[in-house]
Image: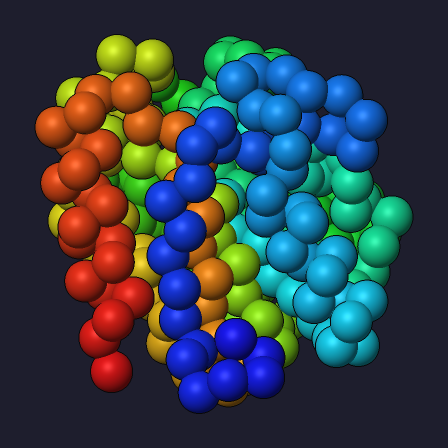
Amino acid sequence: MLERDHNRAFCAVRPPGHHATADTAMGFCLFNNVAVAAAYARDKYGLERIAIVDFDVHHGNGTQDIFEADPKVAYYSTHQSGLFPYSGNMRERGVGNICNILLPPGSDSFRFRNTWADDMLPQIDAFRPQLLLISAGFDAHRGDPQADLMVETEDFAWLTTELVAIANRHGGRRVVSMLEGGYDLHALGECSVAHVGALLAP
């Protein structure tokens, strides 16, 4: 992507990756796919501002653990409070490159969108990422059996559109999205299609 004309990609990977640390597999995750991508872009291409955006219903503890002392990689996550892996407290700031916001059970579209619009997206925009990576978990969907958020398919499309706009402003339009959680197959398929549609938009 950094050497070719293509500037957006969706990777339908299984198993997911964001719980895996540098040396430990956990939470269905063997290798931290998005962390490997960020480290590769940083080391091979010398990027100094890489943003990882994680909207999976679970906190990406592995991703945070890998980069919490690396100011070149910023991690932004919303996740339901009280769920595995029981991490991602808002006081966890790394070296100023970590931003976590917990959503209480029952949070709906209004709260999800407002949290991103008011708190997260302005911070990502201010970071001016040269590359934007997405941990695209769709288990915050209202139909997913693993959690208790009430996010709709259209909310994921909306957030993807907002992230693409940030990448267009600062990152040469470069966005790589990697599939994380999603355990209701109908919702997973529906959300993935909406997400990819927003990624492909001009």
Q: Is residue 29 visible in this depiction of the protein?
A: yes
Residue 36, placed above or below residue 31: below
Q: Is residue 31 left or right of residue 113?
A: right
Q: Nearer the viewer, residue 21 or 163?
A: 21
Q: Is residue 90 visible in this depiction of the protein?
A: no
Query: Residue 114: x, y in percent?
Result: 33, 50
Q: Is residue 72 left or right of residue 172?
A: right
Q: Nearer the viewer, residue 61 or 100?
A: 61
Q: Nearer the viewer, residue 21 or 149?
A: 21
Quarter of the image for residue 151 reads: top left
Query: Residue 177: x, y in percent?
Result: 43, 55
Query: Residue 198: x, y in percent?
Result: 23, 64
Query: Residue 192: x, y in percent?
Result: 23, 45
Q: Is residue 106 left or right of residue 180?
A: left
Quarter of the image for residue 46 reads: bottom right
Q: Quadrant of the C terminus?
A: bottom left
Q: Residue at x 68, y 49 (%)?
A: 36
Q: How is the image coloured?
A: rainbow
Q: Residue at x 52, y 75 (%)?
A: 1
Q: Residue at x 58, y 71 (%)?
A: 131
Residue 121, placed above or below residue 194: below
Q: Residue at x 59, y 48 (%)?
A: 34
Q: Is residue 24 left or right of residue 169?
A: right
Residue 59, placed above or below residue 168: above
**Could you tell me how many numbered marks the image carries?**
0
